[in-house]
Amino acid sequence: MFAFEPDPLNQAALAANLESMGLGDHATVMPYALGNASGQVPFAGTGTVTSQVTTEDTGSTVECRRLDDIEWPMTPTYIKMDIEGAEPEALAGGSELLRRHQPVLAICTYHRSEHLWQIPDLIRSIAPEYHVFLRRYAEECWEGVCYAIPKRRLRRA
């Protein structure tokens, strides 16, 4: 398992949680943000779930990587993203990975209202073989997730 966490405080908490679950030897925490370009990006680190890449000068930066630029020791088969609104950029930065290997995707759509249609459209524009499903996890329309499953991995009932 690979996890990406650019916030140093959250990295430590994540590593401790993985260790407490007995997954410490089976997980690699990478200290990067994900986006559509590799390099340093402004970052608002809070040590909470609201840490995020920002367009504002926060005086703090983190290393950002494209999924396509990661040297994977094994091919990802499942990718989950809840990255505070940076999901479209991260998907674009992984377009070759998505086209070539077609991992199952679970991508949050609730950080910006337009993500509800932009994320499914982006996934299908990158790899049309994906079947796209939307699911909400709260009473209102928030907490939505876009699931994308390649046809060859889709189980029909």
Image (tube, rainbow, N blue to C red):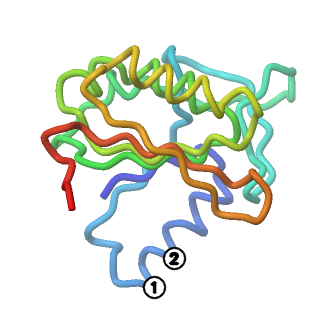
Q: Is residue 23 left or right of residue 49?
A: left
Quarter of the figure with residue 137: bottom right
Tell me how many marks there are.
Answer: 2
* Mark drawn on residue 20: 1
Q: Amino acid at mark 1?
A: Ser
Instruction: List x then y, in percent, for residue 42.
Output: 74, 25
Quarter of the figure with residue 39: top right
* Mark drawn on residue 81: none
Q: Quadrant of the C terminus?
A: bottom left
Q: Is residue 73 above or below residue 135?
A: above
Instruction: List x then y, in percent, for residue 35.
Output: 54, 24
- Asked if labels 1 and 2 touch by Cβ distance under 8 angstroms, the answer is yes
Q: Amino acid at mark 2?
A: Asn
Instruction: List x then y, in percent, for residue 4.
Output: 48, 47
Q: Is residue 152 left or right of residue 18?
A: left
Q: Quadrant of the N terminus?
A: bottom left
Residue plotted at (59% across, 43% down): 6
What element does badge 1 sit on?
Answer: helix
Residue plotted at (76% across, 33% down): 112
Q: Is residue 107 above or below residue 61?
A: below
Residue plotted at (71% across, 43% down): 110
Disc 2 to disc 1, C-alpha distance: 5 Å
Residue plotted at (57% across, 32% down): 87
**Most foreground residue, 105 or 60:** 105
**Most foreground residue, 90 or 14:** 90
Instruction: Report which residue position mark 2 lands on.
Output: 17
- Classify 10 Å Cα crowding around label 1: few (below 14), some (14-19), many (20 and above): few
